[in-house]
Amino acid sequence: MMLMLLCIDAGLSCVDPQRHLLVKLQRIKVIERDRMRKILAFILWALLCCCCCWKTQAEIFTSISQMTDLIYTEKELVQSLREYIQAEESKLAAVKSWANKLDALTKVSTSDPEGYLAHPVNAYKLMKRLNTEWTELETLVLQNPSDGFISNMSVHRQYFPDAEDETGAAKALMRLQDTYQLDSEAFSKGKLPGIHSNAILTVDDCFDMGKTAYNDADYYHAVLWMQQSLKQLDSGEESVVSKEDILDYLSYSVYQMGDLPRAIELTRRLVAIDPSHQRAGGNLRYFERLLLKQLNELNQDYQPASEEPIKLGTYIRPKDHLPEREAYEALCRGEGLQMNDVRRSRLFCRYQDGKRNPRLLLKPMKEEDEWDSPHIVRYLDVLSHKEIEKIKELAKPRLARATVRDPKTGVLTTANYRVSKSAWLDKEDDSVIDIVNQRIEAITGLTVDTAELLQVANYGVGGQYEPHYDFSRRPFDSNYNGDGNRLATFLNYKDEPDAFKRLGTGNRVATFLNYMSDVEAGGATVFPDFGAAIWPRKGTAVFWYNLFKSGEGDYRTRHAACPVLVGSKWVSNKWFHERGQEFRRPCGLTEVD
């Protein structure tokens, strides 16, 4: 599982295990041919033994009647032989079909692994294929011993994604669906903003997506994906899953969304197909009684279910833990931006020499204002392509699931609102890290001696980091005044201990974020509090202060990394701490200087 997640985030080829397996599959033909000869020899030997035994015991050849029995015995043996041959041929045909399909697939995926995995549907299907479909193939071959294949599977099994990975990839697609308001049909046909590919989802894929949501009691997404599965099945697409199963899940999920008329209509369809269905009859009677009770209480007449197909927007998505969810997702789509002509007139570009820093005198840095207050700037040509590739090369073997600090315990832990992999690089690891550190120090004027190591992060399918602060919040201050939204957010973290106390370097005073890749779609850095969105541009970096000069946290800097829709997002960041900055950024006279 760890290797597969590394491959998604780092853009490595995850299909090499498939290549080795395909080679082994070719050997199955020879193995199975030898086994067929042995089985045939055994059957003939068994038949001969039967004849010999009967002859010894009863002299069968002297009795036509007994010989007639042998005729029928032989017929049964021949039938058994033909069934064996048919089973072997069917198995080999199925294995050949797998081999041909996977061979064609790996030729495409290995030609550009990172580009292939950049499409979220390809990444999801890789998770699903290695976790589910290769297991089905293993079961097929296991019907008769095939030591070479099983041995190879055992070797590579430890690197395969598990059910949790498949579920995670499915949820990532749902997250992208919500954030970028994409309907299930667009996803199933590979139609993403600005992109159309042959990465499609089948009836069974859509069903599995819906089932993943259903098992998580996420009936909103269960409805969307079960409906899409049913739509594709009704259009004539072949599938393994039956219409009865789809209607079973769909009708109950619709009921959970509070749409009783439609739940009744779907359940009636299910009963019409399978009158003996275990749950359908009981559910139908229950739904009808419940609807009748509601209509009587409201003194309303029965209204038939809407004939409009279920689609994105038919039902309201349930609220979750994030108070600014709608504003955050709108910014990710490029909506709700608060940039206007007045604010734009206050933004400038300039050459930055770091207050005549020797490192920047001959080649000053290009600086652009991204936002006026709080002041956010972007630096151009911070990292060269060669430096970026070296940093990625150093980080890839060390990438591990990114963690966050639990707001109550201060302990590092994984969270579903931060989906990425990260690695920490020290200047001792390679000279390029030391060079980058010194360059960042020259640009910002802040010392890196008390800064954290360079963190490198890669966001895979649906990779994101929901709205958060980079600095550690103090215990709740009753004198704090803010608007309703920010106050609610602040209260969520009022019990957070000093997360950086053990470092002895104070709070995170500033963030320097390097973009190490372009992203085809999605992946913006957004600030919901004041409606800003900053889009990744390879080689550039953005910088902002998390604290006022007084040391108080600037709660406006709550920000997020939007889900990556298409592409692979690489970033690296340097977090500066307060200690050592006393004379580089002196304290202000007021709390909000």
Image (cartoon, rainbow, N blue to C red):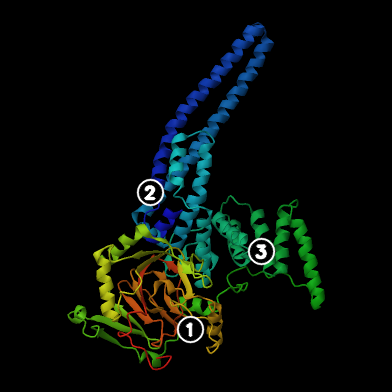
> Which picture quadrant has residue 66?
top right
> In the rendered structure, which disc, 3 or 2, sits on the residue that comes first in sequence?
2
Residue 82: percent from left, percent from top: 56, 28
* Kind of residue sitting beneath label 2: Asp
Nearer the viewer's eye, disc 3 or disc 2? 2
* Kind of residue sitting beneath label 1: Asp
Q: Which residue is mark 3?
A: 253
Residue 357: percent from left, percent from top: 21, 82
Residue 418: percent from left, percent from top: 47, 68
Residue 16: percent from left, percent from top: 38, 48
Q: Is residue 79 above or below residue 90?
A: above
Which residue is found at the position 51% from the left and 58% from the top?
A: 201
Q: Nearer the viewer, residue 271 or 436?
A: 436
- Distance between the alpha carbons at the discs numbered 2 and 1: 45 Å
Which quadrant is the C terminus positioned in? bottom left
Q: Which residue is mark 2?
A: 16
Nearer the viewer's eye, disc 1 or disc 3? 1
- Distance between the alpha carbons at the discs numbered 3 and 2: 39 Å
The answer to whether residue 381 of the structure is visible from this angle is no
Which residue is found at the position 65% from the left and 19% from the top?
A: 72
513 to the left or right of 308: left
What element does badge 1 sit on? loop
Nearer the viewer's eye, disc 2 or disc 1? 1
* Kind of residue sitting beneath label 3: Ser
Indicate which disc residue 529 carries: 1
> In the rendered structure, which disc, 2 or 1, sits on the residue that comes first in sequence?
2
Q: Are marks 1 and 3 in contact (CB under 8 Å)?
A: no
Which residue is found at the position 31% from the left and 83% from the top?
A: 368
Q: Is residue 364 above or below residue 241?
A: below
Packing grade of label 2 (10 A; few <14, some 14-19, many >=20) is: few
